[in-house]
DNA sequence: GTATATGTTTGTATTATACAAGTAAATGCC
DNA sequence: GGCATTTACTTGTATAATACAAACATATAC
């Protein structure tokens, strides 16, 4: 029993490292989904889901340095996908929110991504998809220290 | 039914992007597992599993440019984890194989990684771990174009 | 009202990467 | 059997993402 368990965990370790390599590649390559870079997609999605946010919070969310987020956000702002406004209660803080264009871009890309997943998981049963989603979510919880 | 399916796929898309971000971070951060960088770990593991390999094949395996692999392999060679030998049937080809030190390092890191997964998945049943491994493998197959 | 703390931006260095040019070896053709 | 072409790899160069540190702006505490 312990041995079975051992094998299963080894398999998860193996498959996860492989998955990360392939999925990241897919995002970078020609076959990349949609128009938004991975980092942009994630940032827009976060703002869409959780509402306006400031740099420090975004940096924590994505486990990146604030300076990195500062540049990313400026670049995305320059593209017009997000806009900056001052926190009325604290003049130091820049808050970012999705623009209409940004939301539009996000919706388009999200749709394309989800369609690609639909196609990839074509031959999976609904039950399998549900279980996979659930286990991924639990894995993600486990990944937070 | 279709709607359920839709939701499940959306969840998979969401959880996978999150998982990639977190898992990659974990590899980079202080909490990183073992001593080997992600790229080194993957390369050593590949040589261990599939035997000696040449640059071109490694580049294809990892979806990276040959020049990138050339530098990576040289760096890993300089550390003494892999060694280079000439293909006896083709003088242009450099083949790489694990050294004893490299194998040792790989085993240590693999053990640490698997232990971490064990700890993270502590409260999963064996059945859940098995299913997750299986679904990840199928996902990986689906990710190949 | 000054010292300190906080939020962000900017300067700089590092790393991973791709693409292009160069080098060495093999293959093909006459 | 020697030259042209192809193949495998290395090296030069550019770019992008990142972290860390310094600078700057605003807020808070005493």
Image (tube, coloured by chain):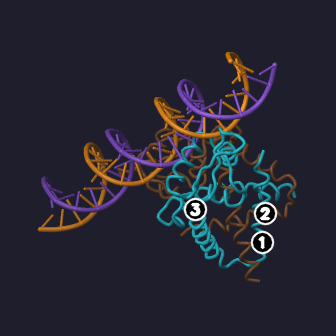
Chain colours: A cyan, B brown, C orange, D purple
Determine whether B89 is above or below C29 in the image: above
Q: Can residue A117 be seen in this view?
A: yes
Labels 1 and 3 positioned on one and the same chain: yes
Coordinates of residue B143 in the picture (x, y in percent): 59, 67
**B105 left or right of B7?**
left
Q: Which chain carries label 3?
A: A
- Within 10 Å of disc 1 (Cα), the crowding (few <14, some 14-19, many 20+) is some
Question: Which residue sits at x=52%, y=55%?
Answer: B62
Q: Which mark is residue A52?
A: none
Coordinates of residue B141 in the picture (x, y in percent): 62, 68
Tell whether label 3 touches label 1 (CB within 8 Å).
no
| Label 2 residue SS | helix
Q: Which mark is residue A135?
A: 2
Question: Which residue sits at x=75%, y=61%?
Answer: A136
- Within 10 Å of disc 2 (Cα), the crowding (few <14, some 14-19, many 20+) is many
| Label 3 residue SS | helix
Determine whether D15 is above or below A79 in the image: above
- Within 10 Å of disc 3 (Cα), the crowding (few <14, some 14-19, many 20+) is many
**A1 left or right of A107?**
right
Q: Tag 2 or tag 3, which sits nearer the N-term?
A: 3
Residue closest to the eye, C24 or C7: C7
Tell whether label 1 touches label 2 (CB within 8 Å).
no
Q: In which quarter of the image is residue D4?
A: bottom left
**B68 left or right of B13?**
left
Q: Which mark is residue A102?
A: 3
Q: What is the distance, in whole Å, between disc 3 and disc 2 at their CAs?
A: 31 Å
Q: Mark 1 points at which residue?
A: A130
Q: Which chain carries label 1?
A: A
């Amino acid at each position: 029993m312990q041995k079975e368990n051992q094998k299963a965990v080894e398999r998860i370790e193996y498959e996860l490292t492989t998955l990360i390599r392939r999925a990241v590649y897919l995002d970078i390559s020609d076959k990349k989904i949609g128009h938004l870079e991975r980092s942009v997609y994630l940032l827009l999605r976060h703002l869409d889901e959780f509402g306006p946010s400031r740099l420090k919070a975004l940096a924590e969310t994505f486990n990146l340095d604030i300076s990195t987020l500062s540049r990313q956000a400026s670049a995305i702002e320059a593209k017009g996908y997000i806009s900056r406004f001052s926190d009325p209660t604290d003049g130091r803080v820049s808050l970012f929110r999705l623009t209409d264009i940004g939301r539009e871009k996000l919706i388009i890309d999200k749709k394309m991504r989800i369609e690609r997943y639909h196609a990839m998981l074509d031959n999976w049963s609904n039950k399998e998809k549900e279980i996979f989603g659930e286990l991924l979510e639990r894995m993600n919880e486990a990944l937070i220290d």
